[in-house]
Amino acid sequence: MMFMEEVVRIFDSFAESDEAEKAYYLSLTPRQRLDILLELNRRCWDEADAETGPRLARVYRIVELSSG
């Protein structure tokens, strides 16, 4: 399991923020970027599984119809 360090930075503009984010991801190795992707994917699926909770079993009943 990968633990990500939480960092807060303040920028003067959205453009400056976008450039800093781009520079950060370019500084990572391909393996580090892949690890981040897999961690976010795992978190997403864990949350989706937690929301559904236990499920009911599907039950089907076969009924013969009268021909009249």
Image: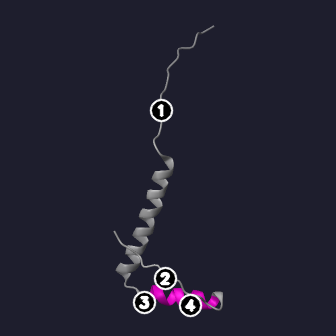
Q: Amino acid at mark 2?
A: Val
Going from the N terminus, do you reach mark 1 or mark 3 first?
3
| Amino acid type, residue under disc 1 in the picture | Arg
Determine whether the residue tagged by mark 4 lies in a helix, strand or loop: helix
Q: Is residue 53 left or right of residue 17?
A: left
Residue that mark 4 sits on: 19
Q: CA distance from mark 4 to mark 3?
A: 12 Å
Mark 4 / mark 1, whichever is N-terminal = 4
In the rendering, at what x and y percent does residue 22 appear? Answer: 52, 87
Per the image, label 2 sits on a secondary structure element best described as loop
Amino acid type of the residue that numbered disc 3 sits on in the rendered structure: Ser
Q: Are marks 3 and 2 in contact (CB under 8 Å)?
A: no
Colouring scheme applied when the structure was drawn: one colour
Mark 4–mark 1 distance (CA, rounded to whole Å):
51 Å
* Quadrant location of the N terminus in the rendered image: bottom left
Q: Secondary structure at mark 3?
A: helix
Which residue occupies the extreme right position in the image? Answer: 13
Which portion, as a residue range, is magenta?
Answer: 15-27
Q: Which callout, 2 or 1, points to the residue nearer the camera?
A: 2
Residue 7 disc label: 2
Judged left or right of residue 64, residue 43 is left
Residue picked out by circle 1: 58
> How far separated are the C-alphas under marks 3 and 2?
16 Å
User: In this rendering, which labeled residue sits more in front, label 3 or label 2?
Assistant: 2
Q: Is residue 13 left or right of residue 8?
A: right
Q: Amino acid at mark 4?
A: Glu
Q: Are marks 2 and 1 in contact (CB under 8 Å)?
A: no
Q: Where does the C terminus fall, quadrant-wise? A: top right
Residue on which the image places disc 3:
27
